[in-house]
């Protein structure tokens, strides 16, 4: 082997060593940074300073690797490698450098023979490997430090130190074995979901029926665990204690006791909700004028939070009249969903075989069930579509032919026309003189006033033919607060607001009120869409006459009996929250536990409140400020503070909540 | 302009989006007439018809539901029935068909079971039968039960969905809707006022 080959070989070895060293140092620094982060994180939970991101640790590792590469950049020069070899073996007296230099043409043979005689390879091998050994040792040390930091962060360090001391005969008090809990949640089998694990949580949120295992550090002797009022068995698994339970159907708490240490976990059950099914086709009910033929296609869409099982389209045919009706129910379009979270049902019903006759009613709905084998299955149905075959005598009445269009319908159309007129006038505004614009707006306002009066007539059931615009003066008899049809009343009020703005040319302000009125009319129209027999007769009982207490004739009055809202749950929770917050100063050691208990207590009745309390508990456990979460919790009970509309000049006296 | 602090009882008929909710339009007036005759309850002189899907239904302490045809509540109707009951309201459902094999009975009980829970028999010594008038033998029979209409049965019990110790939903297969569906002016021709049990239902709903 020539000197030049020797140098090249050593250069290759050094390159490999350099790269391996850089990688090992990268790993070592990465682990060191992560260990430091874990230690700081464990300390910060008590001290209030958070750790940093793992990406920073990776960046530090990569930087250190790059630094090692930079330091070893000379391995890419053969001359520097030769000099490095000479430095390690001075006896060569630059024979290697000289022999490997291509510019030297002197007698190389003697130099080569001198190099061959030397034992340079033996000397060089340890020198080449030393950086890798150093880097490997560093990596091993840092891996140990990382493992120790993990132990510290998991809360097991105290226990391990205690066990170690006990082995060598040093007796120390057993540390708190309720810290660093691990929670393993196994959902019910029918869900097909995987097991999940939580580290040191304050609450366990899981499907009803889930199997939950709590694992803590240390032996189980003396540890007491209760689920609500029921005591649970605590067992030993290796060097840990463990207990398990099934998530009940109502929120509760797990209370853990270890001598003078205690801890509370909120158990928030998640209900497997029933599936949802929507009949998407056909979209509305229908009245057939004649007995129909052909078929109808039905399409329904079903969804579930866990998984659907099966579904079908169910139909009922009802025939008869008066007091005698017969019905038969059947189904078709059976489908198996195979635990999918969503699916579609399709079926076609042939009408001819149903034997529909005049007055017959076909009621169709979709029915789906989920695969909840634990507490179900839950069965859900869609809204029902009703198809009715009209009777022949329904259309031979003069009343039908002479009847005007339903007044609410007419108002709805006209309100839309007014909106279109107002919008088009608004577009023309730049081209119009201000006076013309206000006059045109006033015309729309006058139309709006006409409509409002018509709605007024409908509201108070007045005869439109007999009562024109003058009907509104009788406010004492017709208290607008006492009207029954709240949608029409809302439309009426919105029309008032729109009218006032239109009359002074403020179309921008009027349009939202006009749209609100149209929307309210639409709701009123839909609310009255179903009546198979038309309007029910109104019979007004003369109470005074019946009771023989007066001469007045009975007056129509549709006052709704208002009762105080039974909203005592929120008030009760608010009192409990006050009591819990008071513990912050009176009993700080159990302040967080009180919030956790309140969270479990409120999970079923007020989920937003419970969620906000959960955030507050997490913040408090992390040593952070929980005021914003507690404020949200309070608002979930009492509602947000009322803010008056700043655009209205008067909002104080009339700003009383409804 | 504000609401009166003293409220009057308003008889409310629930409108549902399927079937014929308005099949007994004279029952409200008839019961209001009886309430005026026998009690001193402050009354509105006419009943109201309120959609079950509307939040306005929650304002009424007693909601009367009847019909002959299939009852299929929408999600909103079902939700409001639950809310009404949770808030302490009471619902009185009467099968206008008087037929336990009839479509109203089948579908209505199915919907009630889904919305609340399965109706159970109410014992004939229940407080309901002593709420105003005494009905020692339980619910009074109706002429529809005796004349062979419907299922040709005399139903011994009413049914109900209980909340704690009170009736949240009262279900009748006795067809009081037919029995009471006449103009109150005609009551004077009856030898016995057959609407007295209606007074018990209202008084029970208001006082339990």
Image (tube, coloured by chain):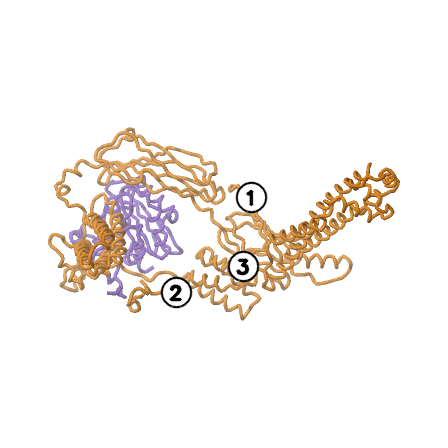
Chain colours: A orange, B purple
Residue B130, can we see it? no
- Crowding at mark 2 (Cα within 10 Å: few <14, some 14-19, many 20+): few
- Residue at 24 percent of width and 61 percent of height: A481
Check if mark 2's residue and mark 1's residue have beta carbons within 8 Å: no
**First reached walking from the N terminus: tag 2 or tag 1:** 1
Q: How far, Cα to Cα, is label 1 from label 3? A: 25 Å
Q: Is residue A615 above or below residue A85?
A: below
Q: Is residue A368 above or below residue A62?
A: above
Q: Which chain letter matches label 2?
A: A
Residue B62 at what x, y percent from top left? 30, 55
Q: How far, Cα to Cα, is label 3 from label 2? A: 25 Å
**First reached walking from the N terminus: tag 1 or tag 3:** 1
Helix, strand or loop status at disc 2: loop
Please tell me if label 2 and label 1 are on a single chain: yes
Helix, strand or loop status at disc 1: loop
**Residue closest to the far left:** A466
Q: Which residue is mark 2?
A: A641
Q: Is residue B94 above or below residue A476?
A: above
**The label number, if any, that marks residue A194 in the structure image:** 1
- Crowding at mark 1 (Cα within 10 Å: few <14, some 14-19, many 20+): few
In depth, the one of B49 and A629 nearer the eye is: A629
Residue B26 at what x, y percent from top left? 20, 50
Quadrant of the image containing the N terminus of chain B:
bottom left
**Residue closest to the far bottom:** A586
**First reached walking from the N terminus: tag 3 or tag 2:** 3
Which quadrant would residue A171 be assigned to in this image?
bottom right
In depth, the one of A604 and A608 nearer the eye is: A608
């Amino acid at each position: 082997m020539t000197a030049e080959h020797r140098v090249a070989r050593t250069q290759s070895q050094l390159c490999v060593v350099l790269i391996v060293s850089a990688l090992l140092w990268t790993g070592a620094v990465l682990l060191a940074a992560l260990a430091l982060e874990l230690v700081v994180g464990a300390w910060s939970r008590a001290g209030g300073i958070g750790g940093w991101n793992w990406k920073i640790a990776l960046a530090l590792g990569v930087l250190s690797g790059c630094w090692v590469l930079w330091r070893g950049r000379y391995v890419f020069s053969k001359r520097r490698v030769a000099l490095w070899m000479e430095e390690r073996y001075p006896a060569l007296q630059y024979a290697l450098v000289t022999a490997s230099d291509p510019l030297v043409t002197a007698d190389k043979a003697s130099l080569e023979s001198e190099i061959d005689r030397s034992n340079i390879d033996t000397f060089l091998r340890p020198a080449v490997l030393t950086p890798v050994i150093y880097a490997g040792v560093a990596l091993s040390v840092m891996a140990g430090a990382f493992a120790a930091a993990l132990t510290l962060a998991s809360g097991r360090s105290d226990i391990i130190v205690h066990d170690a001391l006990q082995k060598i005969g040093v007796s120390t008090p057993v540390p708190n074995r309720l810290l660093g809990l691990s929670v393993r949640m196994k959902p019910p089998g029918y869900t097909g979901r995987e097991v999940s694990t939580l580290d040191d949580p304050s609450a366990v949120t899981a499907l009803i029926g889930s199997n939950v295992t709590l694992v803590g550090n240390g032996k189980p002797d003396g540890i007491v665990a209760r689920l609500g009022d029921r005591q649970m068995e605590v067992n030993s698994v290796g060097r840990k204690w463990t207990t398990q339970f099934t998530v009940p159907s109502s929120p509760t708490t797990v209370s853990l006791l270890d001598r003078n240490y205690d801890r509370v976990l909120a158990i928030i059950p998640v209900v497997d909700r029933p599936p949802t099914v929507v009949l998407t086709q056909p979209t509305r009910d229908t009245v057939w004028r004649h007995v129909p033929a052909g078929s109808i296609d039905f399409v329904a869409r079903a969804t579930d939070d866990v998984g659907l099982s099966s579904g079908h389209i169910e139909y009922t045919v009802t025939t008869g009249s008066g007091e005698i009706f017969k019905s038969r129910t059947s189904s078709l379009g059976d489908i198996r969903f195979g635990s999918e979270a969503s699916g579609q049902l399709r079926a076609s019903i042939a009408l001819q075989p149903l034997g529909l006759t005049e007055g017959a009613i076909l009621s169709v709905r979709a029915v789906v069930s989920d695969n909840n084998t634990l507490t179900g299955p839950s069965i859900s149905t869609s809204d029902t579509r009703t198809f009715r075959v009209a009777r022949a005598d329904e259309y031979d009445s003069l009343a039908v032919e002479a009847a005007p269009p339903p007044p609410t319908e007419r108002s709805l159309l006209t309100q839309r026309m007014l909106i279109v007129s107002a919008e088009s006038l608004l577009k023309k505004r730049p081209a119009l003189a201000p006076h013309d614009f206000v006059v045109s707006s006033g015309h729309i306002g006058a139309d709006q006033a006409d409509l409002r009066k018509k709605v007024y007539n409908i509201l108070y059931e007045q005869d439109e033919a007999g009562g024109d615009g003058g009907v509104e003066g009788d406010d004492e008899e017709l208290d607008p607060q006492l009207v029954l049809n709240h949608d029409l009343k809302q439309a009426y009020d919105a029309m008032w607001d729109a009218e006032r703005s239109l009359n002074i040319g403020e179309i921008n302000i009027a349009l939202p009120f006009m749209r609100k009125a149209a929307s309210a009319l639409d709701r009123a129209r839909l609310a009255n869409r179903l009546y198979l027999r038309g309007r029910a007769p109104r019979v007004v009982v003369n109470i005074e006459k019946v009771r023989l207490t007066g001469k007045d004739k009975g007056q129509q009055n549709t006052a709704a009996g208002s009762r105080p809202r039974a909203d005592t749950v929120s008030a009760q929770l608010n009192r409990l929250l006050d009591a819990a917050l008071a513990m912050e100063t009176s009993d700080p050691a159990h302040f967080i536990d009180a919030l956790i208990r309140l969270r479990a207590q409120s999970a079923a009745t007020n989920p937003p409140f419970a969620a906000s309390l959960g955030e507050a508990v997490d913040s408090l456990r992390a040593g952070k400020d929980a005021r914003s979460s507690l404020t949200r919790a309070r608002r979930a009970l009492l509602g947000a503070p009322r803010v008056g509309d700043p655009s209205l000049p008067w909002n104080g006296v009339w700003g009383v909540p409804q | 302009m504000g609401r009166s602090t003293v409220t009057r009882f308003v008889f409310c008929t629930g409108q549902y989006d399927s079937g014929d909710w308005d099949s007994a339009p004279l029952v409200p007036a008839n019961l209001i007439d009886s309430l005026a005759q026998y009690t001193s309850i402050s009354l509105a002189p006419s009943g109201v018809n309120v959609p079950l899907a509307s939040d306005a239904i929650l304002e009424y302490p007693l909601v009367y539901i009847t019909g002959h045809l299939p009852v299929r509540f929408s999600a909103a109707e079902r939700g409001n029935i639950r809310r009404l009951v949770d808030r302490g309201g009471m619902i009185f459902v009467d099968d206008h068909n008087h037929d336990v094999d009839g479509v109203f009975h089948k579908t209505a009980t199915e919907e009630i079971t889904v919305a609340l829970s399965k109706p159970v028999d109410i014992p004939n010594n229940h407080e309901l039968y002593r709420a105003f008038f005494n009905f020692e033998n339980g619910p009074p029979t109706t002429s529809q039960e005796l004349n062979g209409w419907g299922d040709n049965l005399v139903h011994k019990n009413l049914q109900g969905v209980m909340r704690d110790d009170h009736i949240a939903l009262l279900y009748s297969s006795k067809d009081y809707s037919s029995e009471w569906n006449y103009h109150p002016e005609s009551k004077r021709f009856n030898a016995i006022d057959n609407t007295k049990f209606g007074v018990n239902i209202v008084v029970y709903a208001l006082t339990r």
